[in-house]
Amino acid sequence: MTTLLIGYGNVLRGDDGLGPFVAAAARRRNWQGVKALAAPQLLPELAAELAAADAALFVDACFDGHDVELRKIEGGGSEAGAFTHSASPAGLLALAAALYGRAPRAWIVSVRGERFDLGEGLSPPARRNAESALIRIAELLVGSSTIGRLDSERLSGEEL
């Protein structure tokens, strides 16, 4: 099984870079069966990658709510959304289904940030939330046969 993890957001706007930060950390962990991509925004070109995956995780920063929230994407969304400046995960999944005949099961991982002004780097609270997100993602990957399995021994003692 292959899981595609797409972390998206603007790394030049503080905590908006949480998605790419989590994707880079996941890539360094080299989790078996997981392909991690970082992107400034969701683009139609990602539809081909999605169609080839068995499952997908979209990681993005949010302004409020829980530190880390995980929710399954239900339905395909609007195909038109994949062709605009701000495509949605559901829109990209619909595009993958329309163009390639399939779309994976997918989840959104929202990670709460604190500072979204101009500037690089994450705030300390956002960094802690990113670490929590990586733990939640690892738990999901290990515990869910619908996504795939990871070697849990690889997860112990790792740092961001």
Image (cartoon, rainbow, N blue to C red):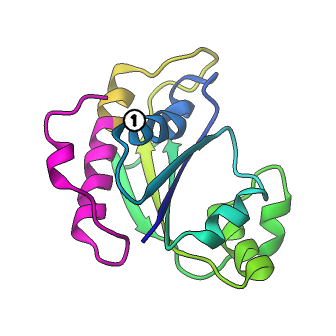
Q: Position of residue 32 (x, y in %)?
A: 35, 55
Left or right position of 145 against 119: left
The residue sitting at 63% across, 63% down in the picture is 89
Residue range corresponding to the magenta coloring: 131-160
Left or right position of 23 against 158: right
Q: Position of residue 62 (x, y in %)?
A: 50, 44
* Residue 129 position (above or below residue 149): above
* Residue 131 position (above or below residue 55): above
Query: Magenta includes 51?
Result: no
Query: Magenta includes 142?
Result: yes
Q: Which residue is mark 1?
A: 28
Res 63 seen here: no
Q: Position of residue 77 (x, y in %)?
A: 68, 76
Which of the 4 image quadrants contains residue 146?
A: bottom left
The residue sitting at 61% across, 70% down in the picture is 52
The answer to which of 151 and 47 lies nearer the viewer is 151
Which of the 4 image quadrants contains residue 20?
A: top right
Q: Quadrant of the N terminus?
A: bottom left
The answer to which of 159 and 78 lies nearer the viewer is 159
Judged from this view, the residue extending furthest toward the top is 119
What element does badge 1 sit on?
A: helix
Left or right position of 7 against 142: right
Q: How many marks?
A: 1
Q: Amino acid at mark 1?
A: Arg
How packed mark 1 is, by other alpha carbons closer than 10 Å (few <14, some 14-19, many 20 or more), is few
* Residue 94 position (above or below residue 108): below
The residue sitting at 29% across, 36% down in the picture is 131
Q: Position of residue 34 (x, y in %)?
A: 43, 56
